[in-house]
């Protein structure tokens, strides 16, 4: 078990393509950290640098207190689970799991004990004599995890391990990996492009874009206090709605105004602005999550000054909730409402905004305007 | 709808059988003539399509002398070592070329492809003078190195195509497991290449056994003669002395090992070809 520290890490490929820029991160011992971001954001490259599969162009990587930049992957005491499982096709499940230990000249009895123990944890004892081609996707993934577990590494690295599984199995394996982390009490670094995986599994999430860290925070903090427009849009499904508004002060009241709508911003929210004065009369981006729209009558009556007109384009009934695809003053938005909602496609309805949960971003820098 | 009506009888048209039979005759006929010839009396000069008047097994026993076994040993030695050298170096070179990220490797791969197009005969004079200089004339190792070098571009090319289809994640998993590059090649990559290795081994073995061009120039001492050279000299002497049946027996016996090898290994060759097509 060990902490992982990355200091000013850069990865520049031949030809000058910069995959990772100035990456700074302290991962605590036993932490489950998730690197998330769109394709090409540098998350896998970062993981591969920790594994030693990619050279670090600049910066320092520590596992525990040992500088690892020039240490061979086998000596880093890490184990990695790959997206395509990377099981050795000609070996049985047992041999796949034992291969690394054999190379380390671990005594046979010890290898046997560890393999069987890992197989028991992952419920693959009955598969030990099979070859990978005789396994289902989920079973292969378990074997890949088993191969990592038997090594008893200081750090587990996982590169999109669930992306080859179907949706149902992915949900199941997600909880399995979380349970595994709780059981093993080891540092996990997990890469995914799926924000649901990130939100449900990570004790902290690193959101990346274009090789840069955008925000490092706990899932809830990330959701409630995104530092910029990218994080706000990336975390959450359906994603946050963004409406360009003008901040207007009328007496003691502050309003966010679109062309035809006027939404009162509560005093508590105004106080959270870092520099409210600078933005009065200015155009900013207002963000609101789909679940912060309400079409219930009681909510609309109690929030007259934060109600807008919305034209409903499409209604999606999902059973437990309903998505309303709507147009508010020329801006397409999605609302997640109660399934008992009576709104139908083609209706123009009144819909209220939970103004305490509004987000505001600078139009130019795209940074949040609010403090926590 | 009536299901029975929908069912179509799956049969092979009869004309196909005629084509198959014609092809089989074309392939079998030379072998038949050879065996037929080898079992005749010298005096039996009827058409070679007729069976022998009297079967003379002595033609075979007369051939099985010291010089035949010596040639058999030479051919086997050359064949085994050519296969080993070609497979070992071809697969290693291919692994390096495929996995290397350097541009030099990329260029080398295309040069390798170009080398495959050059006929061996075109290089004969240069090769011969080189072999004289390095003192490898009348040496079985000379033939082994030459044959292996001649086959290496094709072997490397074939291996490269296969290795490209093996996910690099396997190498990376092995590296993290603690394997060196050589261990990864031996324990992880080579087992995936079983089909191509067997195919290439058989092709190389057949090529080496039947190699005539290089041995005829480089193996001038009789003690170094291979089976093919022995067959050649048997037919040469048949021309002057007139014992054609004995020359045919030499030929039949000389080809026997490679025919047996082919019969046993053809399944692997076909598997290898299918495997490469699927990949």
Image: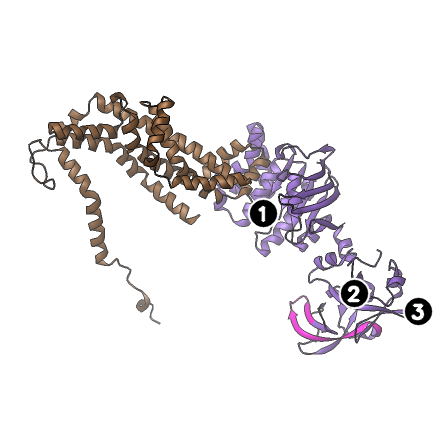
- Bounds of the magenta span? A305-325
A253 on left or right of B183: right
The quadrant the N terminus of chain B occupies is bottom left
* Same chain check for tags 1 and 2: yes
Q: Is residue A55 visible?
A: yes
Q: Residue at x 68, y 55 (%)?
A: A195
Classify residue A64 by image quadrant: top right
Chain letter of disc 3 in the image? A
Disc number placed over residue A83 in the picture, else none: 1
Which residue position holds label 3?
Answer: A252
Cα gap from disc 3 to disc 2, whole angstroms: 20 Å
Can residue A298 be spotted in the picture?
no
Label 1 or label 2, whichever lies nearer to me, is 2
How crowded is the residue under tag 3: few (<14 C-alpha within 10 Å), some, or many (20+)?
Answer: few
Which element type, helix, strand or loop, lies under badge 3?
A: loop
Circles 1, 3 touching at the beta carbon (< 8 Å): no
Residue A286: give its label. 2
């Amino acid at each position: 078990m060990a902490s992982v520290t990355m200091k000013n890490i850069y990865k520049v490929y031949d030809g000058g393509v910069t995959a990772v820029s100035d990456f700074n991160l302290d991962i605590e011992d036993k932490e489950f950290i998730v690197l998330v971001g769109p394709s090409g954001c540098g998350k896998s490259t970062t993981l591969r640098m920790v594994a030693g599969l990619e050279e670090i162009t600049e910066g320092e990587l520590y596992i525990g207190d040992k500088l690892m930049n020039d240490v061979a992957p086998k000596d880093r005491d890490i184990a990695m689970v790959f997206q395509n499982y990377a099981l050795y096709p000609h070996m049985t499940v047992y041999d796949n799991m034992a291969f690394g230990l054999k190379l380390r000249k671990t005594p046979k009895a010890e290898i046997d004990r560890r393999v069987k123990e890992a197989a028991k944890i992952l419920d693959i004892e009955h598969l030990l004599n099979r070859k990978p081609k005789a396994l289902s996707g989920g079973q292969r993934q378990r074997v890949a995890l088993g191969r990592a577990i038997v090594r008893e590494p200081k750090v587990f690295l996982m590169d999109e391990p669930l992306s080859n599984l179907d949706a149902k199995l992915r949900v199941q394996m997600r909880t399995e990996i979380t349970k595994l982390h709780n059981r093993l009490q080891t540092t996990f670094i997990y890469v995914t492009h799926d924000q649901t995986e990130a939100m449900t599994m990570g004790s902290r999430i690193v959101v990346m874009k274009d090789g840069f860290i955008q925000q490092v925070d706990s899932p809830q903090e990330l959701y409630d206090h995104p530092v910029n427009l990218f994080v706000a849009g990336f975390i959450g499904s359906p994603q946050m709605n963004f409406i360009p508004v003008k901040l207007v002060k009328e007496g003691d009241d502050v309003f966010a105004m679109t062309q035809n709508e006027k939404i009162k911003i509560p005093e508590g929210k105004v106080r959270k602005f870092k520099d409210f004065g600078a933005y009065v009369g200015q155009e900013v981006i207002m963000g609101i999550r789909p679940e912060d729209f309400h079409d219930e009558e009681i909510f609309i009556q109690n929030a007259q000054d934060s109600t807008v007109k919305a034209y409903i384009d499409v209604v999606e009934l999902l059973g437990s909730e309903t998505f309303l695809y709507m147009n508010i003053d020329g801006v397409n938005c999605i609302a997640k409402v109660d399934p008992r909602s009576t709104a139908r496609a083609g209706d123009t309805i009144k819909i209220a905004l939970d103004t305490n949960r509004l987000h505001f971003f600078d139009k130019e820098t795209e940074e949040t305007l609010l403090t926590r | 709808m009536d299901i029975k009506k929908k069912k179509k009888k799956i049969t092979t048209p009869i004309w196909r059988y005629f084509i198959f039979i014609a092809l089989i005759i074309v392939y079998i006929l030379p072998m038949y003539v050879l065996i037929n010839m080898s079992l005749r009396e010298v005096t039996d000069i009827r058409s070679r399509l007729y069976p022998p008047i009297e079967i003379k097994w002595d033609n075979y026993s007369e051939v099985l002398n010291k010089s035949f076994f010596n040639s058999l040993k030479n051919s086997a030695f050359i064949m085994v070592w050519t296969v080993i050298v070609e497979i070992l170096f071809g697969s290693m070179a291919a692994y390096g070329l495929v996995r290397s990220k350097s541009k030099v490797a990329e260029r080398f791969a295309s040069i390798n492809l170009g080398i495959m197009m050059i006929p061996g005969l075109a290089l004969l004079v240069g090769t011969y003078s080189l072999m004289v200089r390095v003192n490898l004339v009348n040496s079985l190792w000379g033939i082994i190195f030459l044959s292996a070098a001649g086959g290496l571009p094709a072997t490397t090319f074939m291996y490269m195509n296969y290795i490209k289809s093996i996910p690099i994640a396997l190498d990376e998993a092995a590296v993290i497991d603690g394997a060196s590059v050589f261990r990864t090649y031996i324990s992880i990559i080579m087992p995936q290449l079983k089909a191509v290795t067997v195919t290439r081994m058989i092709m190389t073995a057949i090529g080496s056994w039947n190699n005539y061009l290089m041995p005829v120039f480089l193996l001038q001492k009789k003690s170094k003669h291979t089976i093919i050279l022995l067959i050649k000299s048997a037919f040469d002497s048949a021309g002057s002395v007139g014992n054609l049946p004995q020359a045919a027996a030499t030929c039949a016996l000389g080809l026997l090992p490679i025919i047996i090898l082919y019969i046993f290994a053809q399944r692997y060759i076909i598997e290898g070809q299918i495997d490469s097509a699927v990949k």
